[in-house]
């Protein structure tokens, strides 16, 4: 059940603190990691009542009664539950429930999720499904209403659209904490009425506006974007990016996901330049199920940030209190202090941060990596399934790229993948022509990419070229996860394998699949909106592991190459992307020809 509000339980909290009533639970003799004072205070007890903290001090024996559960911290660190300030559940390929099950053993007790993936497929009803699923989970899951559906109007066609009226409706729902990342930064900077209307509605509601300024050029457009109202940004990759955002009154969100490694460079704004860390926040943005199950979640981010030279207490503040203050929830989460939710981690080491006990709202939910609570699987309705509508069976010929008449070779634009970063490069390559068709160049790692329309059954295929995956055998990888419009993306060195992979996903209702020389090597079925599995996170992680291994057997050496694959249609991050209208130059926000 949701933890009661402070208003509902304040009299009991006061009585417990005074010793007039007994606590439900007391954690005894721990080192208090105080994110307000920046201290670590040994010999501290915590008294918990009705899911909230009633007392923190040297001796809570006056709150202990015959039915009080006493947990011995035995000198371990008592750390506030970790908060993920920005992330997308769908990118874990699991439901909200399964994502929560996966991260609780890693110490995450609050998540701020932006479900704009499902919104691009199912619209506001899809957002409502995930919102309602979040309400009764053991941990605190807050939802941002997606701001850009589609992400770039005029440059892509998604499966749904959201407008200002939709945003206003969703802002009234109980778990909505603000507006999701405002990706259409040119729209904000140019004064687009819809974008500014969504921001205004959020600010009138007293909630937080998420940002997303993906350009490395900090010119007038950046300043216009900041003036438009976004309060944070997670798209920085350099020290100067983080500094620029904080200096302008934004929170710089530094992310470490499965494929985005943006913390190391940006923390230098603190460790080298001495900027005040209060306005820096840690997040994951994108974590697939294999990372969650095998490597961790926010605990992984905290460990990594400490390894870059941040003080442990500063790092923990960036993953707890700073996040709570940013979203206006400081009185509920982000610290171990009276009145707050009793979200507490016990750990024997503040640098390596082993997660030994996790409490959420006063309940032990995990110990030593093992979940201690039963969480029923989510049930999604029929309208959330069967969303992959290709319209026809594809053949190898659908992936032919015709050359200009009479050409013996062409100069083509090529999407260049950058390992461990979301941006791409706008490359060019000289490609041969045979029988009137442009050929791939395996020797120089240029293969084909295709976008298959899957929302309206048009049967349309958009073809282009991509470099950076390293595929060196006849193969193809296809996915119905293609941020943010979520058409199908197929990448390969073999047109027949591209067709086979695409048709296979049409049959199973969505997912990711790897084909090699006509044979299916691995598939992760994602029947919910073509984005999420209805299986347990551990099962999805195992399938995802097979998928990653299959990509490697095809020659791919990129770290988490699937995450790179899934972002190649995201037409709001420079430099070059593919959409259902063709190639998009995201430095100029316009369609460009395939041939130079």
Image (tube, helix red, strand yellow):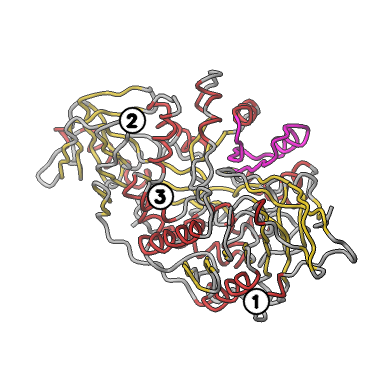
Front position in the image: 111 or 338 = 111
Q: Residue furthest right?
A: 406
Residue at image point 63% right, 31% down: 241
Q: Is residue 397 left or right of residue 387?
A: right
* The label number, if any, that marks residue 140 in the structure image: 3
Question: Secondary structure under badge 2?
Answer: loop
Which dot marks residue 351? Answer: 2
Residue denoted by label 1: 390
Residue 383 in percent (x, y) is at 54, 75
- Sequence-wise first label, 3 or 2: 3
Quadrant location of the N terminus in the rendered image: bottom left
Counting from the top left corner in percent of width and height, residue 282 is at 48, 37
CA gap between label 1 and label 3 equals 38 Å
- Could you say which quadrant of the image residue 32 lies in? top left
- The magenta-colored residue range is 209-238
- At mark 1, the secondary structure is loop
Q: Which mark is residue 144?
A: none
The front one of 556 and 340 is 556
Nearer the observer, disc 3 or disc 2?
A: 2
Membership of 224 in magenta stretch: yes
Q: Residues within 10 Å of mark 3 (few under 14, many from 20)?
A: many
Element marked by disc 3: strand
The mark closer to the camera, 1 or 3, is 1
Q: Assess disc 1: are there few (<14), some (14-19) or many (≥20) residues with their C-alpha within 10 Å of its C-alpha.
A: many
Q: Position of residue 398 (x, y in %)?
A: 72, 74
- Furthest residue to the left? 66
Q: Is residue 519 left or right of residue 61?
A: right
Per the image, is 488 magenta? no
Seen in the picture, residue 490 relative to 506 is either above or below; the reply is: above
Where's residue 75, x and y in %? 19, 30
């Amino acid at each position: 059940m949701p933890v009661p509000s402070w208003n509902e339980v304040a009299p009991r909290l006061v009585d417990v603190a005074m010793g007039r009533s007994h606590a439900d639970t007391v954690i005894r003799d721990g080192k208090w990691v105080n994110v307000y004072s920046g201290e670590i205070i040994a010999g501290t007890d915590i008294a918990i009542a009705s899911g909230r903290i009633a007392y923190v001090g040297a001796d809570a024996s006056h709150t202990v009664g015959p039915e009080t559960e006493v947990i011995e911290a035995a000198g371990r660190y008592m750390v506030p539950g970790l908060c993920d300030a920005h992330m997308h559940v769908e990118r874990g390929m699991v439901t909200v429930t399964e994502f929560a099950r996966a991260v609780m053993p890693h110490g995450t007790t609050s998540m701020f999720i932006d479900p704009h993936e499902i919104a691009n497929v199912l619209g506001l009803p899809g957002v409502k499904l995930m919102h309602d699923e979040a309400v009764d989970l053991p941990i605190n899951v807050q939802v941002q209403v997606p701001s850009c559906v589609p992400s770039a109007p005029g440059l892509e066609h998604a499966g749904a659209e959201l407008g200002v009226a939709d945003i206003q409706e969703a802002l009234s729902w109980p778990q909505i904490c603000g507006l999701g990342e405002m990706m259409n930064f040119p729209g904000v900077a140019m004064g687009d009425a819809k974008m500014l209307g969504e921001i205004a509605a959020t600010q009138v509601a007293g909630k937080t506006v998420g940002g997303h300024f993906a350009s490395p050029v900090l010119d007038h457009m950046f300043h216009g974007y900041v003036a438009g109202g976004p309060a944070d940004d997670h798209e920085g990759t350099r020290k100067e990016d983080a500094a620029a955002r904080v200096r302008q009154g934004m929170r710089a969100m530094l992310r470490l996901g499965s494929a985005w490694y943006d913390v190391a460079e940006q923390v230098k704004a603190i460790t080298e330049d001495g900027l005040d860390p209060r306005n820096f926040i840690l997040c994951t943005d994108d974590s697939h199920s294999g990372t969650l199950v095998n490597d961790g979640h926010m605990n992984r981010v905290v460990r990594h940030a400490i390894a870059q030279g941040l003080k442990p207490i500063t790092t923990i503040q960036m993953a707890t209190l700073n996040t709570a203050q940013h979203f206006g929830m400081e009185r509920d989460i982000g610290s171990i202090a009276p009145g707050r939710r009793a979200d507490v981690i016990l750990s024997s080491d503040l640098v390596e941060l082993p997660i030994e006990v996790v409490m959420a709202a006063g309940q032990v939910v995990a110990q030593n990596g093992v979940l201690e609570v039963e969480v029923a699987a989510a049930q999604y309705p029929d309208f959330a399934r069967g969303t992959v509508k290709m319209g026809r069976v594809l053949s190898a010929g659908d992936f032919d790229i015709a050359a200009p008449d009479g050409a013996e070779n062409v100069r083509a634009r090529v999407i260049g993948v950058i390992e461990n970063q979301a941006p791409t490069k706008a490359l060019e390559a000289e490609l041969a022509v045979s029988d009137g068709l442009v050929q791939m160049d395996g020797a120089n790692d240029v293969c084909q990419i295709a976008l298959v329309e899957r929302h309206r059954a048009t049967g349309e295929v958009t073809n282009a070229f991509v470099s950076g995956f390293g595929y060196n055998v006849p193969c193809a990888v296809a996915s119905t996860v293609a941020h943010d419009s979520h058409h199908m993306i197929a990448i390969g060195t073999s047109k027949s394998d591209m067709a086979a992979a695409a048709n296979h996903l049409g049959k199973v209702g969505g997912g990711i699949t790897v084909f090699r020389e006509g044979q299916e090597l691995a598939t992760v079925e994602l029947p919910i909106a073509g984005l999420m599995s209805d299986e347990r996170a551990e099962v999805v992680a195992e399938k995802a592991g097979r998928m990653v291994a299959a990509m490697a057997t095809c020659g791919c050496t990129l770290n988490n190459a699937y995450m790179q694959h899934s972002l190649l249609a995201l037409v709001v991050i420079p430099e070059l992307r593919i959409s259902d209208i063709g190639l998009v130059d995201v430095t100029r926000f316009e369609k460009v020809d395939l041939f130079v």
